[in-house]
Amino acid sequence: MSGRVLVTGGAGFIGSHVADLFVRQGWSVAVLDDLSRGKRENVNPAATLHVLDIRSPDAAALLERQAFDVVVHLAAQMDVRRSVADPAFDASVNVLGTLNLLEALRRSGTAGHTRVVFSSTGGAVYGDLATPPNGETTPKDPDSPYAVAKLAVEHYLSYYARIHGISTVSVRYANVYGPRQDPHGEAGVVAIFCGRILAGEPLTVFGDGQQTRDYVHVGDVADATYRAASVNLDEALHLDDRAFNVGTGIATSVLDLATTLLDAAGVSVPIEFAPKRPGEQQQSFLAVGKAARVLGWSPRISLANGLADTYRWFATRETAAVPSRT
């Protein structure tokens, strides 16, 4: 299958990998990104970049005037801490921005021929009260405005599917890591650890380091997202019918992550322990059997191999940034 796809947030970490995969599969790819966090250098040369805010009339006009077979919607306000500090801003981007695009599709007259794949969160949408592994039908009780907004969008997608005939899918990502992740600001721990190793600085582990997460490589995430966009799916009647967890199904402690990454890097820096952060989720990993059954997808990249790949990318970028001496 091939066609025309729009990847919102396609200049960002995950979005650029998704856009790359669509290009490799022969699709005509457009990227919509306001470049507030994304980077031009991440955009595939074969893709067309539209520098737009997803809340803008121009973004809506793009969807109204161009018939896309698939819209992969990854553009988002992704900083959980900012969502707590400013929930109205978070909702303006993550909820109202998404509605701007969905309404444009509805008005376009081609909504019935477009599949919308939405990047939700498997790490946060189920909340701290759920006992992992969390499956798609696990009760949802999110604990941050960011996760509340993601769940709200899933409900909107379910509405647009039932009432307006838009084919919608939600992919609930676990903790994604890999090349192009930003080690600054609100970033994944792998990117932060890579940056500290390359700087020769200690790795900081909060609490006893036994808190677990489900770490999935961005290459596997791109593959799952592509499959969600391209495979035939049954009709969606309920919220979770078209939702798929995307992770490894493996709980990895932060301490094990740190030691595995140091082994992959072949470098030794100290691991320092800091006080436990109040309210930090202690145990989180996903059940991913539904994606295997329905999408034919399973993660292929082991944590050790994925961390080695990620560290090599950061190390290469660090080397390229050092001016040569003449």
Image (spheres, rainbow, N blue to C red):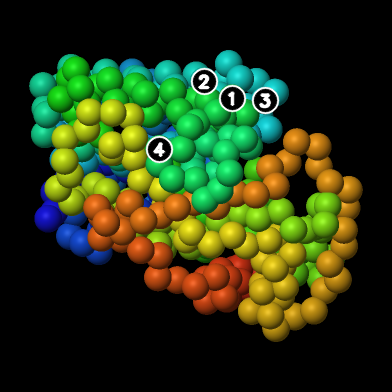
Task: Give the residue furthest to the front.
Answer: 131
Numbered mark located on residue 137 in the image: 4
Q: Which of marks 4 and 2 is nearer the N terminus?
A: 2
Q: How far apart are marks 1 and 2 (CA)?
A: 8 Å
* Residue at (12% x, 29% y) in the render: 112
Q: In this view, does 159 lie above or below 284?
A: above
- Percent coordinates x, y for residue 133 in the rendering: 52, 51
Label 4 CA crowd tier, 10 Å (few <14, some 14–19, many 20+): few
Q: Which label's residue is closer to the chain start, 1 or 3? A: 3
Q: Is residue 33 among what the camera can see?
A: no
Q: Which amino acid does label 4 sit on?
A: Thr
For the point 58% across and 35% down, the residue is: 127
* Marks 4,1: beta carbons within 8 A: no
Q: Name the residue under label 3.
A: 84
**Which of label 4 and label 1 is nearer to you?**
4
State how far apart marks 1 and 3 are (Cα): 6 Å
- Residue 164 in picture, x, y percent from top left: 17, 20
Local secondary structure at mark 1: helix
Label annotation for residue 91: 2
